Image (cartoon, rainbow, N blue to C red):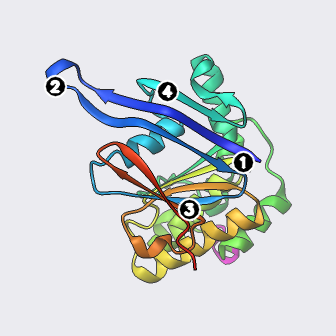
Amino acid sequence: MEILRVEKLCKVYGERETAVKALQDVSFSMKKGEFAAVIGESGSGKSTLLHCIGALDTPTSGSICLDGTNLFGMKEEERTLFRRRKVGFIFQSFRLIAELNVEQNIMFPLLLDHQKPKKEQVDELLELLGLTNRRKHLPGQLSGGQQQRVAIGRALITKPMLLLADEPTGNLDSKSSQDVMDLLFKASRRYQQTVLMITHNMQLTTSADRVFRVRDGRLTDLGGMQA
């Protein structure tokens, strides 16, 4: 079942002589439950790609369809609500709310959407993340790896169709990085969520079903990296 389709996506910053083509005719699709990694050098356009797919940035041309819905064929308010309910984000910088504990940070997207979190769902996530004994801790009382696990829980709590991870291990040591990768892979398999992750570390792509390379704004499908 196809979840994401990107067709002839282009993003240009500036005009005329100063124009920079961040994305050029990018086309690909992803199926439900698929885990894909995007690699590329700094400035290659990979973050721009993720931001456009997550509707955090507006493409210059082309289309992005999530679950059959054209993201940029709807009004801004509709798109914001759609994104909140259908897309989960994991950032390199965690972006946790310092005044909220682990449990509250994870539940925050549901509360923002005026939904009542189910205790069993929160408990299940805390167990999956290995944070059951840390549920009342504040972010400042956690290690970097633990904070990123909270960020993953926050992204998973809404049961999004698409999970977008922008360098989720960039601020972590090698062991914490692998732990985070294992969690993302487990989420993909356990909850059948489609995951698109940016990374500069080729070693972290071994769990991915597919690997894309972005170079000079153009995307190449490298296929599967697993043996």
**Disc 4 secondary structure class:** strand
Of marks 3 and 1, the one in the foreground: 3
- CA separation in Å, label 4 and label 1: 28 Å
The x and y percentages for residue 66 are 66, 36
Q: Residues within 10 Å of mark 2 (few under 14, many from 20)?
A: few
Q: Residues within 10 Å of mark 4 (few under 14, many from 20)?
A: some
**Disc 1 secondary structure class:** loop
Image: magenta residue range: 132-136
Relative to residue 148, is residue 219 depicted above or below?
A: above
State whether residue 142 appears in this view. no
Q: Which mark is residue 18?
A: 2
Q: Residue pushed farthest left?
A: 17
State whether residue 165 appears in this view. yes
Sequence-first disc among 2 and 4: 2
Disc 4 target residue: 62
Q: Quadrant of the C terminus?
A: bottom right
Task: Give the amino acid at mark 1.
Answer: Thr
- CA separation in Å, label 3 and label 1: 25 Å
Task: Give the amino acid at mark 2.
Answer: Thr
Residue at 43% x, 52% y is 220
The x and y percentages for residue 47 are 39, 47
Of marks 2 and 4, the one in the foreground: 4
- CA separation in Å, label 4 and label 3: 22 Å
**Disc 3 secondary structure class:** strand
Sequence-first disc among 3 and 2: 2
Q: Residues within 10 Å of mark 1 (few under 14, many from 20)?
A: many
Residue at 73% x, 52% y is 32
Whether residue 149 is in magenta: the answer is no
Nearest the viewer among 189 and 63 is 63
Sequence-first disc among 4 and 3: 4
- CA separation in Å, label 2 and label 4: 21 Å
